[in-house]
Amino acid sequence: MQEKTGGQSAAAKAGYGIASALLMAFCITIPVMLVLAAVLTFTDFPEKYTTIGVVLATLSGLFAAGFRAGMGNEKNGMLRGGLTGLAYMVILYLVSSICFKDFTLSQRAIIMIITGLLAGAVGGLLGGNRKAKPFSRLNSFGGKSDSFRKYMK
């Protein structure tokens, strides 16, 4: 029997989490890449640091996407984050292969795919193991926390 959660099956909810995490990764990576391109165009930024900038932009997007994918799932956060990282890197590989009309899998591409998988898995691990703050703790700005309220009369 299919498990239903909130009107969606568990598989559909997991797919939605990964899809929204992938969208978030691209929404982080693309603006960072545009800023990096502007810096390279309008300044004397050394081109030897371009690869490092691209890798850091990609990994930051993947880490955030893995965190997002793992947030909704305490048990399989690392797995979902890793799948998100893998899917992101496969999409990037396919798009770049289509643009450059070269589908060879180089050592650099394999390293980037593995690095993306690991970054997503680490983000998913941290996202799945995060402890949410209770809402009442957020409301007690400047006042006493609710944890001591039971002792006050």
Image (cartoon, grey):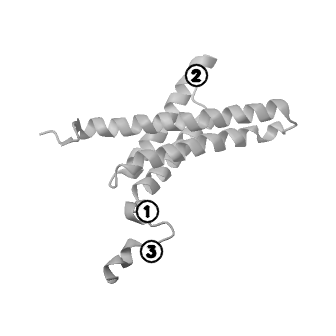
- The amino acid type, in three-letter code, at marker 1 is Asn
Q: Is residue 51 above or below residue 71?
A: above
- The amino acid type, in three-letter code, at marker 2 is Ser
Of badges 2 and 1, nearer the viewer stands 1
Q: How many marks?
A: 3
The residue sitting at 54% across, 38% down in the picture is 113
Q: Position of residue 153 (x, y in %)?
A: 32, 83
Task: Characterize the local packing of mark 2: few (<14), some (14-19) or many (20 or more) Cα atoms within 10 angstroms.
Answer: some
Distance, label 3 to label 2, CA atoms, is 58 Å
Label 3's element? Answer: loop
In the drawing, what numbered circle is on residue 97? Answer: 2
Q: Position of residue 14 (x, y in %)?
A: 32, 40
Q: Is residue 49 above or below residue 100?
A: below
The residue sitting at 38% across, 72% down in the picture is 146
Distance, label 2 to label 1, CA atoms, is 51 Å
- Indicate left or right for 52 with 46 as reference: left
- Indicate left or right for 113 with 5 as reference: right
The N terminus: image quadrant: top left
Task: Characterize the local packing of mark 1: few (<14), some (14-19) or many (20 or more) Cα atoms within 10 angstroms.
Answer: few
Q: Going from the N terminus, do you reach mark 3 or mark 2 first?
A: 2
The residue sitting at 69% across, 31% down in the picture is 34
Q: Nearer the viewer, residue 138 or 117?
A: 138
User: Which residue is at the far right?
Assistant: 44
Residue underneath mark 1: 139
